Amino acid sequence: MRLNAYLSRAGVASRRKADELIKAGRVTVNGRPGELNTFVAAADRVEVDGRPVAKQPLAYLLLHKPVGVVTTAHDPGGRPTVVDLVPRDPRVVPVGRLDADTTGALLLTNDGDLAHRLAHPRYEVAKVYVADVEGEPSDESIRRLSDGIDLEDGRTAPARARRIGPSRIELTLHEGRKHQVKRMCEAVGHPVRRLHRRAYAGLTLGGLQPGQWRELAAAEVDGLRAAVARTATRTRSARRG
Ligand code: URA
């Protein structure tokens, strides 16, 4: 992660203040002066005014995001945010985004490398949504959702779509475009009334109630790491072709 983000996650200063410290030459990385564009990895030694910055323990939390809470670290409009619902120390940030009116599984972590990979479309992690929609989708609508829909930002990738109630659809996506589920359902004539994410990269909420969170088990964190490593290997070999 960038040096300013590293310093802010370690609780040294806000990102803006961290930039000032860096510009003033008060921050070193492995003994060399840090620059605004310096990237820091887990093994790097960062010092401010010659004093080592304590490494933060890595934290991985799964939140059952409730309605009305925004997926950001700070909302200029003063609305409650997902980080208000989890412990402040160590500071974690959401991976990807759910709309304010969407509920469900949201991962928060301070593991910048894993967060970056999970949020990147290339790594294709599965997101399972349950959408309550207007009207009763036909087999044809379900087929269109799974084959791909032409949206203004391009055609959606093939997805798994199935009807699990007269007006309820389960959609498994490997993309994460803005308002994607709502736009897809709207495009087949069934606007979403309520949207819930049932699973994220294989992580499910279990008995968590809206607003509750849990720490991931070590095996779950290993599973996430393996998922992005596996996908990276597959993508590389597919490219080699
Ligand atoms: N798709 C949406 O439309 N909204 C979300 O919050 C997530 C996926």
Image (spheres, rainbow, N blue to C red):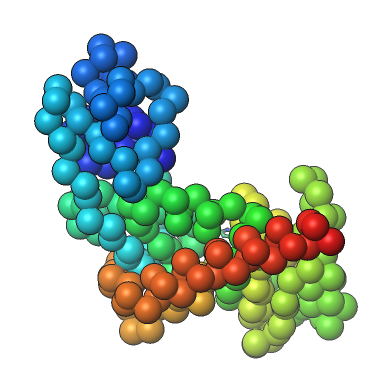
Left or right side of 106 for 150 = right
Q: Between 38 and 138, which is closer to the camera in this rendering?
A: 38
**Residue 79 quadrant:** top left
Q: Is residue 159 left or right of residue 39?
A: right
Residue 21: percent from left, percent from top: 24, 19
Nearer the observer, 167 or 147: 147
Give the quadrant of ligand 1.
bottom right
Name the quadrant containing residue 40.
Answer: top left
- Residue at 38 percent of width and 84 percent of height: 206
Residue 57, picture quadrant: bottom left
Asked whether, in this view, residue 195 is left or right of residue 74, the answer is right
Q: Is residue 85 visible?
A: no
Give the residue at the far right of this rendering. 140
Q: Is the C terminus in the top left, top right, bottom left or bottom right quadrant?
A: bottom right
Residue 134 seen anywhere in this rendered image of the structure: yes
In-image side of 73 versus 27 (left or right): right
- Residue at left 62%, top 50%? 178
Q: Nearer the viewer, residue 72 or 218?
A: 218
Question: Residue 38: x and y, percent?
Answer: 41, 28
Taking 64 as reference, is 95 above or below it?
above
* Residue appearing at x 65%, y 87% in the figure: 164
Q: Is residue 222 above or below residue 175?
A: below
Q: In the displayed image of the protein, which residue is found farthest to the bottom?
A: 165
User: Farthest residue in the left direction?
Assistant: 51
Q: Up-down: is 131 above or below 178? A: below
Q: Could you tell me residue 76's position as x and y percent? A: 36, 33
Question: What is the count of numbered marks?
Answer: 0
